[in-house]
């Protein structure tokens, strides 16, 4: 058991202690605020609990009593802004998966003759990445559509200012999920806290960007619904041969395309009235025009 060690970890508002093997593999972790312990590998349970118990109690002192402070007068929150009546032109519920990429391909894509020449010459097109991305969004969109039979709403291709596009937004009993689709057919993917590597290539900031997009979505929804919400970032990889995740990567949910259905059984976060309120804002194009 001598190979176990305790490592402190503080990020994204979390304060945790990890029990790791000498190679960095986590076998257990504890939340310093709540004291809750999660065992990841049962064979190390006894020693991990002992180490965490020592670390959690080491150096703790009772806090000195402080006199009660007078509460400041309550300030009424300003009323939430109202959106204009929804029209078919502004209804994002009518978007198909990959709607933004479809528009780019139609506007910038080569003619049929050019595509035929590229195919005959086996010459890659500069718009191939758009087509691959579209295929991935359509695949994930089909998986998400299945969840609509269980009280969920799904929106696709929500365009934000500064050339940002939310691939999918899932709203339902288990919360709100901002979903970013990445298609890497036939490749192996490793997801870390901030960066992702595809076939051991150059690090890509997928996790960091996903968290930033979720933050923008949360700000928009809270502005109009008038109550606090939490938007969780999700990365979905399409067509990969292997998908691995760092043990410390807990801020972003990571799935293969068929695993995204794991969101369906989640519940207890939003009431039916809150779901309706959030969806009414999210589907309105005008809500996203000034984010």
Image (cartoon, helix red, strand yellow):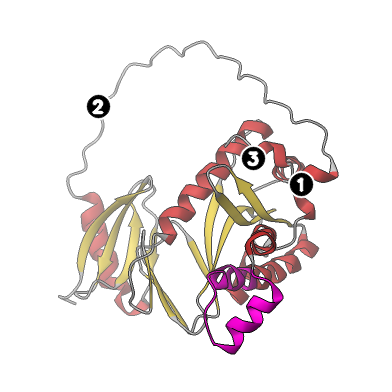
Q: Earlier in the sequence, mark 2 or mark 3?
A: 2
The residue located at (26%, 66%) in the rendering is 19
The alpha-carbon separation of the residues under discs 1 and 2 comes to 44 Å
State yes or no: residue 52 in magenta. no
Pointer 2: residues within 10 angstroms few (<14), some, or many (20+)? few
The secondary structure that most of the magenta stretch takes on is helix
The residue indicated by pointer 3 is 288
Pointer 3: residues within 10 angstroms few (<14), some, or many (20+)? some
The residue indicated by pointer 2 is 64
Q: Which residues are magenta?
A: 110-136
Q: Is residue 173 visible?
A: no
The residue indicated by pointer 1 is 272
Q: Earlier in the sequence, mark 1 or mark 2?
A: 2
Q: Residue furthest left?
A: 2
Q: Is residue 214 left or right of residue 258?
A: left
The alpha-carbon separation of the residues under discs 3 and 1 comes to 23 Å
Q: Position of residue 78 (x, y in %)?
A: 63, 19
Q: Is residue 273 left or right of residue 255?
A: right
State yes or no: residue 112 in magenta. yes
């Amino acid at each position: 058991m001598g190979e176990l060690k305790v490592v402190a970890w503080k990020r994204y508002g979390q304060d945790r202690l990890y029990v790791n093997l000498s190679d960095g593999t986590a076998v257990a972790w504890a939340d310093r605020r709540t004291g809750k312990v999660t065992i990841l590998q049962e064979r190390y349970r006894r020693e991990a609990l002992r180490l965490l118990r020592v670390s959690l109690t080491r150096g703790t002192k009772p806090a000195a009593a402080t006199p009660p402070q007078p509460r400041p007068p309550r300030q009424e929150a300003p009323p939430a802004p109202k959106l204009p009546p929804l029209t078919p032109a502004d209804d994002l519920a009518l978007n198909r998966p990959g709607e933004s990429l479809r528009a780019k391909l139609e506007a910038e894509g080569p003619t049929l003759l050019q595509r035929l020449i590229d195919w005959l010459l086996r010459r890659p097109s500069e718009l191939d990445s758009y087509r691959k991305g579209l295929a991935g969004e359509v695949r994930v969109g089909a998986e998400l559509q299945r969840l609509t039979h269980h009280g969920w709403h799904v929106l696709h291709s929500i365009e934000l200012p500064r050339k940002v596009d939310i691939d999918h937004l899932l709203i339902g009993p288990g919360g709100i999920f901002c979903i970013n689709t990445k298609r890497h057919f036939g490749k192996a993917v490793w997801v870390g806290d901030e960066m992702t590597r595809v076939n051991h290539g150059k690090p890509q900031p997928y996790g960091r960007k996903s968290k930033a997009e979720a933050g923008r979505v949360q700000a928009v929804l809270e502005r109009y619904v008038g109550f606090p919400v939490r938007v969780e970032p999700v990365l979905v990889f399409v067509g990969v041969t292997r998908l691995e995740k760092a043990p410390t990567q807990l801020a972003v949910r990571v799935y293969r395309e068929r695993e995204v259905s794991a969101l369906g059984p989640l519940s207890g976060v939003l009431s039916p009235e809150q779901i309706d309120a959030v969806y009414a804002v999210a589907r309105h194009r005008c809500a996203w025009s000034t984010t």
